[in-house]
Image (cartoon, rainbow, N blue to C red):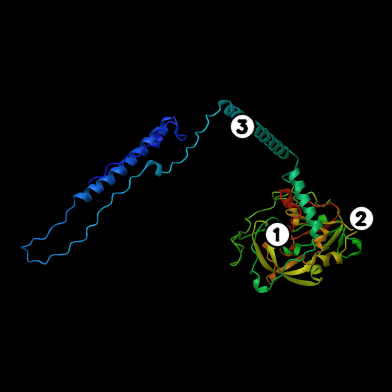
Amino acid sequence: MTPEKQVPNDPLKTSDDPLKMSDGREEREEREKRREIEKKTDRSDRVGEESDDYEPERPDSNSTETPIAAAPIVEDTPAPPVTVSAIPITAPVDAAPEPDPAAIEASNKAVRSKSGKRTRRSFVIAAAAAAAAYTGYNWIDKSEMIGRQQKPLRTAFNTNAKIAREVFNERGIAPTYSKDKAVSELRFNGPYGLRQELVFDSWRLKLVGVANAPKYKQFVPDVTAWEYKEIDFVQPGSAHSDDSKGPAEKPAVWTRALNGDGSPMRGQEEAGDSDSDLDPFTPGLLLTLDDIKALPHHEFVTEFKCIEGWSEIVHWGGYRLADLIAAYPPARNAKGELPKYVYMETPYGDYYCGYNMTACTHPQSLLTTEMSGAPLSQLHGAPIRLHMPIKYGYKQIKRIALIAYTDKQPDDYWTKLGYDWYAGL
């Protein structure tokens, strides 16, 4: 028998239900819930009807087969009806309040105000920065040129040099190495002052500013009258060793220009003549190579560093510049002070350098006559070049022909072309 369908009372239909809402959405949700309840009730009824109609199959009496025991019949008990009250109902959430146009407009206005202020401030700051940068660049670009550098940049160079001198005072000792670390021959770099081959018999070292110079047998009343003999290189060729860092060529065939009176013209390289060259009839000493070799001999294995970014360890031999200065001391000025600077140049002033006296009396500043255990070659500055490991290579002048003590900061070849005068390491 099919039990009578029980239809539970729908409490959602009562008008006094506090959970009932008036909008269409809530009504649709109520109808969906009722449909689900009715579907579940129908399924329960169908299950009960199928249980009542079931009849097990009876065995045939004439059959010889052994009857198989039938499985016990279990009556299906219809599921109890599900009432709407058994379904948990979630409390509805209040709908979001309608936006207030006035409040939105006020908020937008505040945001636009702050954004506008920041945008205007950013534009003002950017414009001021651009104007300042342009003004600064224009000021530097149009300032006075000193040695191919604008004055502010040259001032920065000099300030850096002053700080370096105050901190280090050129007292540092460069690292030394064993001879097996040295290259067989230093890389050739820079033909300035070496465009022609020097005739060694004509070489003299002019020494100017010596105290009581007339007492020395090498004294002459005018060192500027001395002339060096140079000849053109016959075979320019290559000038670097196999273990040196990169190829370098000898100077091309070159002949010195002459003045109108037939004398050799000075300052034939790019930087021109030096502002520190000697006046005519300057007295001084003319030293021979034997005079230099009378000083104590020293050898160092130190690193030569080029401002171009390469370096090589080299075995040097020669005589300390400090010993030369001690043997031929400089004259004191009117205040009783020793000169602060030393000036050097090649024959006819094609290349020239200036130094602090402190750097020249450094124990590793060497008047070099040998390299890698052999006499200097022409292209490496024979008969004498300077090795100063506390300075970059462009301060290590080759083929020295003049050393002058002076109180005025000397001119410098590469400083005229925009480099730093100090060049310290």
Q: Which residue is mark 2?
A: 333
Answer with mark 2 or mark 1, whichever residue precedes in sequence.
2
Vertical position of residue 180 compared to residue 269: above or below: below
Mark 3 nearby-residue class (10 Å; few <14, some 14–19, many ≥20): few
Q: Where's residue 170, x and y in %?
A: 79, 61
Q: Which residue is mark 3?
A: 111
Q: Nearer the viewer, residue 280 or 152?
A: 152
Answer with mark 1 or mark 3, whichever residue precedes in sequence.
3
**Point 14% across, 57% down: residue:** 57
Q: Nearer the viewer, residue 33 or 262?
A: 33
Image quadrant in which you'd find residue 394: bottom right
Image quadrant in which you'd find residue 105: top right
Q: Where's residue 103, x and y in %?
A: 59, 28
Answer with mark 2 or mark 3, whichever residue precedes in sequence.
3
Q: Where's residue 244, x and y in %?
A: 61, 65
Q: Nearer the viewer, mark 1 or mark 3?
A: 3
* Amino acid type, callout 2: Asn
Image quadrant in which you'd find residue 10: top left
Q: Which residue is mark 1?
A: 393
Q: Nearer the viewer, mark 2 or mark 3?
A: 3
Q: Is residue 76 left or right of residue 254?
A: left
**Is residue 265 at all visible to an observer of this figure?**
no
Q: Is residue 20 left or right of residue 5?
A: right
Q: Nearer the viewer, residue 62 or 168?
A: 62
**Is residue 80 at all visible to an observer of this figure?**
yes
